[in-house]
Amino acid sequence: MTGFSTFGAGSGVCYAALASSPDLTRLHATIVAAISETCRPHYQAGRWTPHCTLATGMTDVEIDHARSLLAEDWRSLAGTFEMADLVEFAPVAGIKRWPLAPTPRSTRTP
């Protein structure tokens, strides 16, 4: 997670931005190809923002407050996603969940 952002005024959404990778881009393209007729425009290939949603339903004032709080101490965070969920919203309703292939853990010490 490389940073904190929003989808702009009126979106109500705060998210942690994800570093893109060739694997993530391929996975996204595969999903879009499978659901292309029902894929919302902002999730189409080339328009999608890889992210982890932190909050929804926020007012612009709340988003500005969150941005100022998180900007002070934001640190990039490395990690591994273990599950992928396909959801419908709003309201959020789970449709399908997939476990992601495990990756070897680093043996490097900090």
Image: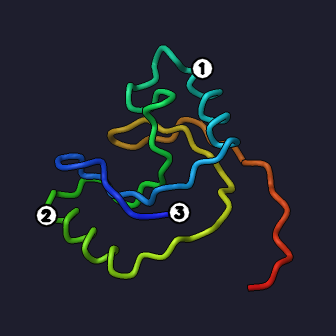
Kindly report the distance in space between the C-alpha atoms of the residues bearing marks 3 and 2: 24 Å
* Among the two numbered marks 1 and 3 on one chain, the one whose residue lies closer to the N terminus: 3
Task: Note whether 22 is above or below 30 in the view shown.
Answer: below
Under tag 1, what secondary structure? helix
**Place of residue 73 in the rendered image (x, y in percent of width and height, measured from the top left):** 39, 81
Task: Note whether 90 is above or below 6 in the view shown.
Answer: above
**Residue at the image position 62 percent from the left and 46 percent from the top:** 84
Please give the residue where the numbered disc 1 appears in the rendered image: 33
- Which amino acid type is shown beneath numbered disc 2? Val
**Residue at the image position 27 percent from the left and 68 percent from the top:** 67
Task: Note whether 68 is above or below 15 in the view shown.
Answer: below
**Residue at the image position 40 percent from the left and 26 percent from the top:** 40
**Residue at the image position 54 percent from the left and 38 percent from the top:** 86
Between 46 and 44, which is closer to the camera in this rendering?
46
In this rendering, the label closer to the viewer, 1 or 3: 3
Q: Residues within 10 Å of mark 1 (few under 14, many from 20)?
A: few
* Among the two numbered marks 3 and 2 on one chain, the one whose residue lies closer to the N terminus: 3
Between 2 and 100, which is closer to the camera in this rendering?
2
Kindly report the distance in space between the C-alpha atoms of the residues bearing marks 1 and 3: 26 Å
- Which amino acid type is shown beneath numbered disc 1? Ala
Please give the residue where the numbered disc 3 appears in the rendered image: 1
Kindly report the distance in space between the C-alpha atoms of the residues bearing marks 1 and 2: 37 Å
Please give the residue where the numbered disc 2 appears in the rendered image: 61
**Place of residue 95 in the rendered image (x, y in percent of width and height, measured from the top left):** 54, 35
